Amino acid sequence: MGGNVLYETIKNEIVGIYAGSHKKLRNGTTLFGELDEGRWHTYLLHPLTSSEIARFEEQMQTVFPSQYKDCLSFTNGCWLFDLLRIAGKAPDTYRGMSEEEESFSPFPLEDLQQLYKRKRTPPDHFIFADSFVKQAYYAIDSTGHVHEVTYKTKKTAQTFDSIALLLQSIVEEGKEQIENDLSFEFT
C-alpha cells in the first residue's frame, strides 16, 4: 500500500474513531476527541505543499528523508491519542491567529531535534517525533527504518519499517485506549 493511501486510511480511521467529535480551525487544523474545554485528544495540522516543504528544508539547511516529506504533505505535525507528537514547521508568524490556532500549531522540528540530539546519536538519525507516555523519541535512519529510542537508555526499544506504519501502530493503540476509557493527564 502506497504512503499516500496509507495516510488517507489512517486519517479515515481517526475520523471514525472519534465519531463526530471534531472541530476544524480556520488554518486547516482538525481537532478530534474533545476531552474538556480546550483540550483535545488528537489533532492533525494542515498539510504542507511541496514548495512549503522545500522552503522548510532550506530553512533547516538539510534534506528531509522522503517519508518525512510524505508525512508533512499529510500533516504538518500532529498529536495522536496523547501518545505521539510529530514535529513540523512552525508558523512564520502568529499574527492574525486565534489563541486556539496558536496553541494547536506544530511543535517546531528544530526544537525537537535540539531536545534529543546527543553526542552518541548516530549521524544518520533524523529525529522527528516524541512520546511523553512512552518516554521516547523517534528517528529515521538512512535505511528508512523508524527507531523508538528511550530517553533513559538512548537505545532502540522498537523499530518500524516507516512513519506510516508507526502511525498505524499508534492508531491501534489509541483505539484500545478509547475502548478501555484510558487517557493521560499532562500538567
Image (spheres, rainbow, N blue to C red):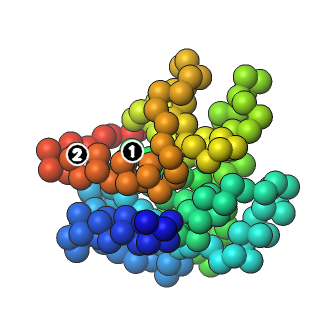
Residue contact at pointers 2 and 1, CB within 8 angstroms: yes
Q: Is residue 187 left or right of residue 152?
A: left
Q: Is residue 20 left or right of residue 123?
A: left
Give 155 or 3, whichever is nearer the viewer: 3
Seen from this angle, which residue lies furthest left? 180
Q: Position of residue 160 (x, y in %)?
A: 48, 43
Reading the chain from its start, which is encountered first: label 2 or label 1?
1
Residue indicated by mark 2 = 177
Residue 163: mark:
none
Q: Position of residue 73 (x, y in %)?
A: 58, 71
- Report how far apart the C-alphas of labels 2 and 1 lie in the structure: 10 Å
Q: Amino acid at mark 2?
A: Gln
Q: Position of residue 157 (x, y in %)?
A: 47, 27
Residue 83: mark:
1
As helix, strand or loop, the secondary structure at mark 2 comes to helix
As helix, strand or loop, the secondary structure at mark 1 comes to loop
The part of the image, by quadrant, that contains residue 7 is bottom left
Give 111 or 11, whichever is nearer the viewer: 11
Residue drawn where x is 74% and y is 39% of the image? 124
Is residue 187 visible in this depiction of the protein? yes
Q: Amino acid at mark 1?
A: Leu
Q: Position of residue 22 (x, y in %)?
A: 30, 72
185 is higher (above) or lower (below) than 33? above
Residue drawn where x is 14% and y is 44% of the image? 180
Is residue 101 visible in this depiction of the protein? no
Decide: few, some or many residues near mark 2? Use Cα within 10 Å; few <14, some 14-19, many ≥20: some
Decide: few, some or many residues near mark 1? Use Cα within 10 Å; few <14, some 14-19, many ≥20: many
The part of the image, by quadrant, that contains residue 41 is bottom left
Residue drawn where x is 53% and y is 78% of the image? 27
156 is higher (above) or lower (below) than 165? above
Image quadrant where one finds the N terminus: bottom left
